[in-house]
Image: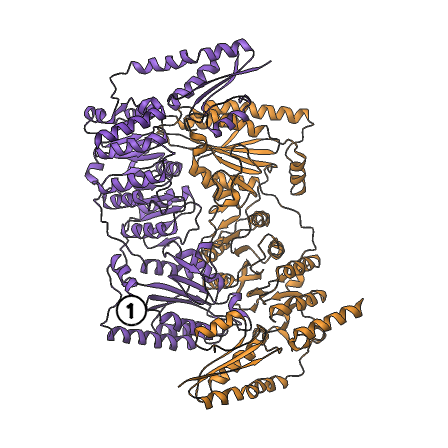
Chain colours: A purple, B orange
Amino acid sequence: MTVVKWNVRAGAYYDSVVLMQLQRGLLELSGVLDAGVVMATQANRDLLATNNLLPADISANPDDLLIVVKADDDNSATEAIGKVDELLARRKSSIVSEDFRPRSLSAAVKQLPEANWVLISVPGRYAAGVAREALELGKHVFLYSDNVSLEDEITLKKSAREKGLLVMGPDCGTAIINGIGLGFANRVRRGSIGVVGASGTGTQAVTAQIHNLGAGISHAIGTGGRDLKSDVGAITAHQALDVLARDPDTKVIALISKPPSPDVATQLISAAQSTGKPVVIYFIGYPAPARKIGNLHFAVSLSEAAEKAVEQLAVNSHQSLMTDKLITGYLRGLFSGGTLAFEMMVGLQASLSPLYSNAPITNYQLLKDPLHSEAHTIIDLGDEFFMVGRLHPMIDNDLRIRRMKQEAADAEVGMILFDVVLGEGSHLDPAGELAPVIKEIREKRIGELKSSGGRVAPNDFGGAYRDHRERGELGELEFVAIVIGTDEDPQNIQLQVSQLEDAGVKVFRTASEAVEYISLKFSHREANQFPPVDLEQLKQPLAGINVGLESFYESLISQGAQAVHVEWKPPAGGNERLASLLAKMKSKKEN
Amino acid sequence: MTVVKWNVRAGAYYDSVVLMQLQRGLLELSGVLDAGVVMATQANRDLLATNNLLPADISANPDDLLIVVKADDDNSATEAIGKVDELLARRKSSIVSEDFRPRSLSAAVKQLPEANWVLISVPGRYAAGVAREALELGKHVFLYSDNVSLEDEITLKKSAREKGLLVMGPDCGTAIINGIGLGFANRVRRGSIGVVGASGTGTQAVTAQIHNLGAGISHAIGTGGRDLKSDVGAITAHQALDVLARDPDTKVIALISKPPSPDVATQLISAAQSTGKPVVIYFIGYPAPARKIGNLHFAVSLSEAAEKAVEQLAVNSHQSLMTDKLITGYLRGLFSGGTLAFEMMVGLQASLSPLYSNAPITNYQLLKDPLHSEAHTIIDLGDEFFMVGRLHPMIDNDLRIRRMKQEAADAEVGMILFDVVLGEGSHLDPAGELAPVIKEIREKRIGELKSSGGRVAPNDFGGAYRDHRERGELGELEFVAIVIGTDEDPQNIQLQVSQLEDAGVKVFRTASEAVEYISLKFSHREANQFPPVDLEQLKQPLAGINVGLESFYESLISQGAQAVHVEWKPPAGGNERLASLLAKMKSKKEN
């Protein structure tokens, strides 16, 4: 009959390698059928239970160590439990031999003054403290640890940004800096593709595939998964794009992430545009807004992201930024076609934020009142809401003309977008009715601009954009139309297009072309107000101080990098009460 | 001083063309500045208000007609309101001259017996009744009307399906049948691309673009926007795919829709696969699962959908269906890489339903208990939940091996998918630990199969698939691995791959290839149990009966189709109370 025995140890810290080795040691003992060595969190207890390793009468706290052995008989089980100390000591002794190792970060810096990176993989609750110390010592941080609080992440990243330092993580699985892999990283040749990755295995899959396709990596900068959430505001991703934009050895950039928050996406896309380099973007699980917007190329899978990046190396044509005047103010889209409105939402939601609609993709985009636009808005005028007892806007232009005038009267509006859908069943001369109205609106706005001192949409970015909107000043008003039709349609498509163009409307024949044009027109880039990451220092041979998983130290050494491993122990040996007491004493001393 | 006057008319029906013409007539009168003629719904009253056309003291019901005039002075306003009857009568007299027109559907059928379609654009509350009558007369229905209830849509479509008839709509804006456009439709050349469109202007944009690219359309079948919701179950889209699959003149199919419900997407994708023809799919606003899955090609914009369809015409290679054994049972994905898990969710969510995860894309995919899979499940074993005091699964295989055994013990599981991420920092021989376990699991399952009478995963579809799962029988268990790495990684990637392959694992080097393989392996098609739509009849010259907007009748005639317009009036002239009384009397008479 099998027997399960266990042992609980409170208040001591063991790193996870030690725990794995203890478990393996126990499994090798004669008569032992299975063993579990875990911190007694609820998740781990549930895991033991699914493996029939959780005795019913066990009592332990989440930060206790729980050792369970299942054996053939009572003797074997008791004997195994009795050997726990011996097994732990065996592990310890192998470490003790390396006692030349520094026991603190500051000691490690003395030992390796040229260190420019600190790799941190200690348990989450200690990680922020170590990272803070690393930043104070002027080092970049690779923060592998998870279970770090969002507040700590924000504080660390803001503090790093002020110093021109990077904090990659928390929960950053991988990076390649200057040819050396940090954490989990594939060995890839050096090359001209820079990667910004808010995802670990995403970056691994893309860098490995780039290598397998014959190209190489300049740097792959990790950000941690939460970097692209609103709270953090993509601090690390922005720093990474900025430094890769300045790096002459990086010709193409790949940006890989789970879907960012909408406001963050907008800013990142603007930042990517202003690098002036081809940027391949893959927001995993987010509908691609287009195949291409200026220098931005959107992928639909990890391997396609790699392929497109390699393709762009070959293209190697410098994509000039749009020098045309940018739009200040909001977009208002007035559509007769519901699907066209939706298609434009999909295409523009990444570039315009906030974007509202009466036919939104996600709930937070829902316009409160279909009759009044807010910020950037796209309206489906053919929605049921408008349609009771009224002809469709593809037949009757009255509703749209009235709404056009309403939007034009709003000084915050910089562009009015609309569709003209030709064909059977539709109005026989929509442009003939719309063009005169547009002409009148544009002339009126230009007249008002002149009389108000002629403040025309400025070419400057960011700040001016916001000021302008806040003050409600008038800018020029641009009209953009998407004309859907064929040369066989009853309306004479050439005549429709030319009437609109004569009224000053920019005309496109597909939604995709309009998406690209508008995205570029609304691109706005805040100037970087923070000290830039020092490119020359980043290109120095990587020298790292490792705190946490020893295997990451061994990996640095095996890659030929200089490295020092800190023989780290948690404050007060992991005893939380004692640690908090020590912290209090320390803070008293400092005051 | 401007003056606003108004007039309310209760209980009478006017079609929306009459209302538009009345409004235009009023605007032409001398002294009139603006006018509104609307059904007095809240939306329309709000619209009047935004145009300063809503007097404060007005009182009207939603089905009253509200006529408002704004004029230079009291006299002009009063005079304009006084002319309403005259203006309405003017419109009426132009119709009266055409009194040879039938006043009922059955009369119209007598006049045009070869009619195969009925086009319906009467107000929503009457539309279902007309459609029911059309189906009873054995006609296909093009249902332009919106504001039709979901219940009516389901009843109509189920009834049509039983008769091998199509109901396109409600709220179907466009279709092209046999070269003739219905509703709003661009004039395009005939050709070999068939379109199934759950969106109006989406279909217009795609068909117009196909024409502009030099190709043509066989049929474009509309479904209405709600067809792809769970409640309706894509009845029309399935019929459309089926008839286009059988049509020898259709070489390529394009399927355009807003994102379907997940269960509907799964079935549609299976149906599209089993057409055996190239199908270009664009689910607008839904992340593309891949660029290509067998004969399916996914687009990221309307114009790309058109381009890909035209491209596929040129390719013209018959894509053979996978003849390999299909999988019965569920997929369980056990990932060490969080992003790889997420990437597979994105790629497989369209093909596998329901699909759960501890790292879901949308909330309804959230797995209740990370320790126990349900249906198709993809687990990120590197999630924080698992990580307290434990080494990452890229270093320590223990957690994954235990979970693999757990999944294998579930007779409903047909495939276990996992990743092996090589490189710096990772385990030095993951395949060496995983392969023996997999071999053992596979041998055990095969042994159990033999002893249980050898019921192996059957090659039959649908029914058997479900029966099998319900009965919890054992099938073969397939293992699929995604190996991420390079030839320079410390693990020797060739050796890793060959160890896995020797254990019977199907190995891919990118997630995309695995997505394609798995999607095809889980493809299941229910046999069509309903009378098919008669292809030969569909290819007869289109002859239509039009009920509602006269312009749709005129459009049929101008395209050279035979057509009859029904001089339709709502029951009891639109008086709801009287209509309900008449309906009761009719139903009494029938009983």
In the image, A55 versus A72, the foreground residue is: A55
Side (left or right) of A477 relative to B145: left
From the viewer's perspective, is residue A14 above or below residue B486? above
- Residue B416, image x and y in percent? 53, 32
Q: Quadrant of the N terminus of chain A?
A: top right
User: The C terminus of chain A lies in which quarter of the figure?
Assistant: top left
Q: Is residue B425 visible?
A: yes
> Is residue B112 among the parts visible in the rendering?
no
Q: Could you tell me which residue is drawn at 66 percent across and 47 percent down?
A: B527
Q: x, y percentage for residue A274?
A: 27, 52
| Residue A532 x, y percent position in the rendering | 22, 44
- Under circle 1, the secondary element is loop
Q: Position of residue B573 (x, y in %)?
A: 66, 78
Residue A178, compared with residue A372, is above or below; it is above
Looking at the rendered structure, the kind of residue marked 1 is Leu
Task: Find residue A447 and report its image quarter.
Answer: bottom left
Q: Which chain's residue wears label 1?
A: A
The image shows residue B322, relative to residue B297, as above or below, that is: above
Kindly identify which residue carries mark 1: A474
Q: Residues within 10 Å of mark 1 (few under 14, many from 20)?
A: many
Q: Is residue A307 left or right of residue A102?
A: right
